[in-house]
Image (tube, grey):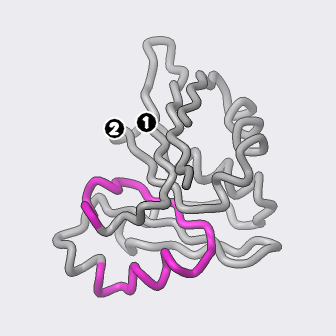
Amino acid sequence: MVIEKVLKSYEDWRKWSDENRKIISGIVAIYGEMGVGKTSAVKQWLKSLNSKDLGSSPTFSIVNEYLSPTGIIYHFDFYRLNSLNEAEDIGLDDYFSSGRPCWIEWPENIGNLLPENSHHLHIEKQPDDSRKLTLEIYEK
């Protein structure tokens, strides 16, 4: 299933996040150009999952862990990944099989390591600075 939505404000992001709480509680590959709002989306998702963490880009650490009332949330940024071995070395399979939310920026940099059961969110900046979201929901 594919869902498209245009968001014009942070309030729209929060509402979208609340409506899609079940999806963002899974593995979500987030695609978009630099500066389009991937990390900003994560910040809104944290609020929707009642985390007290504010969220930040894990560009240099590769993965950030956030706490929520239901447990840990993992946020990956593979922009600076040098090789697939580097992703494997951090125990990526363990993260993905944990059953915890895994949000992945720059998933195209991990190739076939991305699990089949991932949802795919594409974010595109529009001429009016709104964001067009295209969500591809994984269905068995």
Residue depicted at 73% across the width and 78% down the height = 71
Label 2, label 1: how far apart the Cα atoms are: 6 Å
- In percent of width and height, residue 51 lies at 76, 65
The C terminus, quarter of image: bottom right
Helix, strand, or loop for circle 2? loop
Q: Which residues are magenta?
A: 88-112
Residue depicted at 56% across the width and 36% down the height = 1
**Is residue 74 located in the magenta-colored stretch of the structure?**
no
Tell me whether the residue at label 2 lies in contact with that at label 1, contact meaning CB atoms closer than 8 angstroms.
yes
51 lies above or below 130: below
- In percent of width and height, residue 58 lies at 44, 66
Taking the image as shown, residue 80 lies to the left or right of residue 69, namely: left
Tell me the residue that label 1 is attached to: 36
- In percent of width and height, residue 47 lies at 75, 54
Report how many numbered discs are placed on residues in the image. Answer: 2
- In percent of width and height, residue 119 lies at 51, 51
**Is residue 104 located in the magenta-colored stretch of the structure?**
yes
To which quarter of the image does residue 16 belong? top right
> Which label number is shown at residue 33?
2
Say which of 31 and 135 sits in front.
Answer: 135
